[in-house]
Image (cartoon, coloured by chain):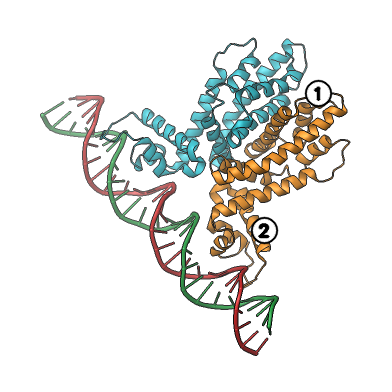
Chain colours: A cyan, B orange, C red, D green
Amino acid sequence: MAEAPRRKARLSPADRRALLEDAARACMARGGIRDFTVDKVAAEAGVSRGLIAHHFGSMDGLLVAVYARMYREWIAAVEAPRPGPTRIAALVEALVSPEIFDHDVLKIWLTLWGEIATNPVLREEHRKLYANYRAAIVAALAEAAAANGRAIDAETVAAAFICLVDGFGVQRCVEPALMTEADARAACWAFLRPHVGG
Amino acid sequence: MAEAPRRKARLSPADRRALLEDAARACMARGGIRDFTVDKVAAEAGVSRGLIAHHFGSMDGLLVAVYARMYREWIAAVEAPRPGPTRIAALVEALVSPEIFDHDVLKIWLTLWGEIATNPVLREEHRKLYANYRAAIVAALAEAAAANGRAIDAETVAAAFICLVDGFGVQRCVEPALMTEADARAACWAFLRPHVGG
DNA sequence: TTCCTTGCTGAACTATCGTATAGTAACACC
DNA sequence: GGTGTTACTATACGATAGTTCAGCAAGGAA
């Protein structure tokens, strides 16, 4: 993994941080939080152990950075322009797209959820960021319902929909065969149709 | 936590194993997989470190035992007789009952899912046991649909429903305020009604 | 009571954890 | 080309990880 011959490549802090975050994610995707260690991440990135503390202060700092990075990329994929008649249709397509409905990505989320449930620093970060994700879904739901002349409690429907989507992630990590992309898309629409029509 | 004064209480293997499993679950509920360690579990149970290896061979052995125990109690709670007009109604009430929709219990499940995604031994155990859980839901769904004269693909609906329920667990661990027992019950029925009627 | 099985302890062991820090060297700037 | 900043390496450190094992003692069998 590590490109051995190169001696000392000085990168900008931003580049090196991104590289270390990627290495951390690769470790998490492989072995969950148990593989999120100084030795494993440094080896994966092909750098010395000390560099993590240099850039992130501590492993907790790297963990928060990984969470923020995951969230940023998730939001980018969700909000990326996609073919679809409505915003909610585009959202569903985003959720089952290869960038998001990916085994490694979902495994990292599962790992992070376990840490959020324990780590107060990460929990606070989550509380702030996840609100935006929720708001995006609420808006898409309200828009779709209004377009079809239905009155719904978008907040409530969004909360349940988020559970459904999170559950896809769990299921895909523990028993991948039982939840394919097509299954997930169908399940999304089976859930959404009674609320927003279409 | 440990009842200090008692010197040597010899328990039957079954009793001691159950006690150690309980201690392991308490540790997991508190700090996830990071607190699932020999020192923490032994201290929680008030026994010496060596006892875990004596009864379970290794920490992996204890992990599998904890999973099997969780599954057994889950199934018992799901299949316990409950007031409800139909089997599916009783199932929903079980899923939001205090024994199952409990923060500690769900945190332990979240922890175990993370391990299942990584640990092959645990994954195999999961594969065998979860099939029964799935089958119970499929049966309840098929029965309800038939009673209301509807034709459904019970397997597919069950898979999605399991995702929804797993998602409750995730959400309750990372942001407990957003998913109460009442919310979960309502979300279950909003999901189920279009398929099975009622 | 005596014996024997075995539940249980406690310490030793090696590996690995995260952090701290002194030293090295790459690159921007003058 | 010399100089200063700092990205980066490498090692030491104490804490803690899981496993192994020799020995103690509780409690049923005799």
Q: Nearer the viewer, mark 1 or mark 2?
A: 1
Residue at (85, 43) in percent of width and height: B82
Q: CA distance from mark 1 to mark 2?
A: 44 Å
For the residue pair B160 and B35, the one nearer the viewer reads as B160
Label 1, residues with CA under 10 Å away: few <14, some 14-19, many ≥20: few
Residue at (80, 30) in percent of width and height: B142
For the residue pair A69 and B114, the one nearer the viewer reads as B114
Q: Which label sits on residue B197?
A: none
Q: Is residue B46 above or below residue B30?
A: below
Residue that numbered label 2 is attached to: B18
> Please, what is the three-letter code of the amino acid marked with disc 2?
Ala
> Would residue B84 appear left or right of D22 to someone viewing this image?
right
Q: Tell me which numbered mark, 1 or 2, is placed earlier along the sequence.
A: 2
> Would residue A52 appear left or right of A188 to someone viewing this image?
left
Residue that numbered label 1 is attached to: B151
For the residue pair A158 and A95, the one nearer the viewer reads as A95
Q: Is residue A4 above or below residue B52?
A: above
Residue B113, image x, y percentages: 60, 41
> Would residue B93 appear left or right of A27 to someone viewing this image?
right
**Discs 1 and 2 share one subunit:** yes
Quarter of the rendering occupied by the C terminus of chain B: top right
Residue A50, image x, y percentages: 35, 42
Residue at (60, 22) in percent of width and height: A95
Residue A24, image x, y percentages: 44, 36
Tell me the SS state at disc 1. Answer: loop
Label 2, residues with CA under 10 Å away: few <14, some 14-19, many ≥20: some
What subunit carries mark 2? B
Report if residue B98 is visible in the image.
no
Q: Place residue A134 in its image quadrant.
A: top right
